[in-house]
Image (cartoon, helix red, strand yellow):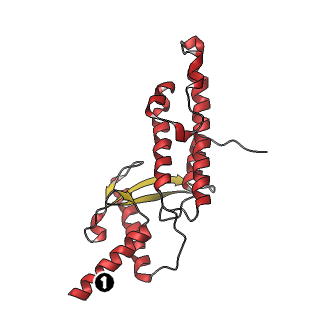
């Protein structure tokens, strides 16, 4: 029998479709991430309907039909149909879906040792920053200095997997565009190699 999960569990399951570097290994993983966000939206919409959608509270009957059925249909104008206490969660999953839509699909490849070393260095440094600064959900931390001056930022978030282990996963942005860490590290490796050649 299908077990209905909580809003948080569905959101966590969507994150779990990502690789460690914040990319999807296949379109199927991206599709499952979208499905989990849709389920999270269902939970939020159903809870909201129980709280708000009653004629006794003065809410018009036709308002029921104004709420989108799927998360990708949600626009700013639809927020008024949700109790204010649900706005933060609604915005979070709408933004997360948009981020996942832009997240690249990158098949794992054999890694260059120097690129792997750089990835490990960046990951450890970011986690250290998160601990030292007690970074909150979606707080952006500058890490450009780890990339030789490249305009790189990272958005960390806490994820709990199916084994109830909580860890931090990050989205990396190069010049404001979501980019896989492996791609950024490979680009940096090439730039550093070019500098060595011209030195």
Residue 77 coordinates in the image, percent (x, y): 45, 29
Q: Is residue 16 above or below residue 93?
A: below
102 vs 41, nearest the viewer: 102
**Which residue is rendered at x = 59% and y = 43% of the image?**
38
Residue 168 in view: yes
Residue 158 in view: no
The quarter of the displayed image where residue 164 is located? bottom right
Residue 109 coordinates in the image, percent (x, y): 53, 76
Q: Is residue 66 above or below residue 195?
A: above
145 vs 30, nearest the viewer: 30
The quarter in which the C terminus is drawn is bottom left
Q: Secondary structure at mark 1?
A: helix
Asked whether, in this view, residue 3 is left or right of residue 141, the answer is right
Badge 1 local density, few (<14 within 10 Å), some, or many (20+)?
few
**Which residue is rendered at x = 55% and y = 26% of the image?**
66
Residue under numbered circle 1: 193
**Which residue is rendered at x = 62% and y = 53% of the image?**
32
The quarter in which the N terminus is drawn is top right
Q: Is residue 61 above or below residue 100?
A: above
In this view, the residue farthest toward the left is 199
Residue 80 coordinates in the image, percent (x, y): 46, 25
**Which residue is rendered at x = 57% and y = 34% of the image?**
44
């Amino acid at each position: 029998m299908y077990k209905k999960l909580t809003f948080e569990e569905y959101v966590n399951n969507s994150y779990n479709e990502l690789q460690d570097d914040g990319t999807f290994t296949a379109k199927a993983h991206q599709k499952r991430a979208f499905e989990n966000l849709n389920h999270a939206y269902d939970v939020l919409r159903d809870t909201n309907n129980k709280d708000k959608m009653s004629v006794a509270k003065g809410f018009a009957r036709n308002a029921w039909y104004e709420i989108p059925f799927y998360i990708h249909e949600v626009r700013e104008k639809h927020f008024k149909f949700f109790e204010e206490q649900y706005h933060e969660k609604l915005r979070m999953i709408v933004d997360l879906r948009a981020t996942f839509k832009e997240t690249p699909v990158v098949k794992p490849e054999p890694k260059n040792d120097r690129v792997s070393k750089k990835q490990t260095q960046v990951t450890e440094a970011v986690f250290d920053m998160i601990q030292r600064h007690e970074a909150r959900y979606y707080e952006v931390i500058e890490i450009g200095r780890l990339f030789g001056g490249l305009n790189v930022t990272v958005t960390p978030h806490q994820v709990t997997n199916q084994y109830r282990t909580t860890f931090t996963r990050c989205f990396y942005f190069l010049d404001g565009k979501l980019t896989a860490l492996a791609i950024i590290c490979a680009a940096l490796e090439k730039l550093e190699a070019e500098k060595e050649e011209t030195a």
